[in-house]
Image (spheres, rainbow, N blue to C red):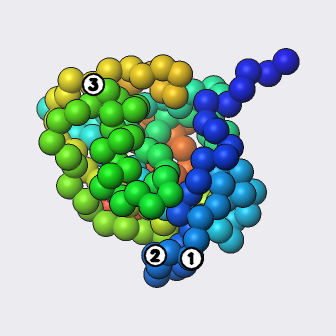
């Protein structure tokens, strides 16, 4: 018997059009089964004094299990704003409760199996950050220009969208 995923498949996501206008609400399961359902997400690039912080995703995640990802990423629940979602995700995934990150931009991410309207944020902080099991199974800081592997497709896309050269 396989362990249950760390996310609830009945979580409600905000579904939007290509201009980020709200169309309605659908479940995680529905959004991840139909790439035409554009749903809101958030990602946080955390820059510390020693480099960029990345998280290793749980092996029980429904997408990119065990891969490295930006320090914090998740979905916008129901009627949450991007900022409300990012503050919640920082607390849930990193135990962080400091000043909020800055909004860098919002981009349409077409990832093949799902499509997200991604709010990307940047946080310059040395924490404190905590490993918040079971969603996150690792945290590490990589010096400038060094990237963990394997890195999720969404992390690669989000970093490129805001000007980081991966390679």
Mark 2 residue element? loop
Q: CA distance from mark 3 to mark 1?
A: 35 Å
Location of mark 2 (residue): 20
- The spot of residue 41 in percent (x, y) is 47, 56
- As drawn, the label of residue 134 is none
Q: Is residue 143 at all visible to an observer of this figure? A: no
Give the vertical position of 108 relative to 62 (above or below): below
**Sequence-wise, which precedes: disc 3 or disc 1?**
1
Residue plotted at (36% across, 42% down):
88
Circle nearer the viewer, 1 or 2: 1
> Whole-Å distance between the Cαs marked 2 and 3?
31 Å
Q: Residue furthest right?
A: 1
Q: Which residue is mark 3?
A: 129
| Circle 1 residue | 23
Q: Secondary structure at mark 3?
A: loop
Q: Looking at the rendering, which quadrant does residue 126 occupy?
A: top left
Residue 108 in sight in this render: yes
Disc nearer the start of the sequence (2/3): 2
């Amino acid at each position: 018997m396989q362990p249950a995923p760390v996310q609830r498949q009945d979580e409600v996501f905000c579904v939007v059009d290509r201009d980020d206008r709200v169309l309605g609400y659908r479940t995680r399961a529905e959004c991840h089964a139909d790439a035409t359902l554009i749903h809101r997400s958030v990602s946080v690039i955390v820059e510390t004094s020693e480099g960029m912080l990345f998280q290793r995703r749980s092996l029980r995640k429904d997408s990119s299990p065990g891969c490295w990802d930006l320090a914090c990423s998740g979905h916008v629940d129901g009627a949450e704003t991007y900022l409300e979602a990012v503050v919640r995700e920082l607390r849930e995934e990193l135990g962080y409760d400091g000043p909020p990150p800055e909004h860098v931009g919002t981009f349409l991410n077409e990832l093949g199996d799902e499509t997200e309207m991604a709010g990307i944020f940047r946080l310059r902080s040395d924490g404190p950050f905590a490993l918040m099991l079971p969603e996150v199974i690792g945290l590490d800081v990589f010096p400038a220009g060094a990237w963990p592997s394997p890195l999720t497709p969404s992390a690669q896309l989000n970093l490129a969208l805001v000007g980081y050269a991966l390679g």
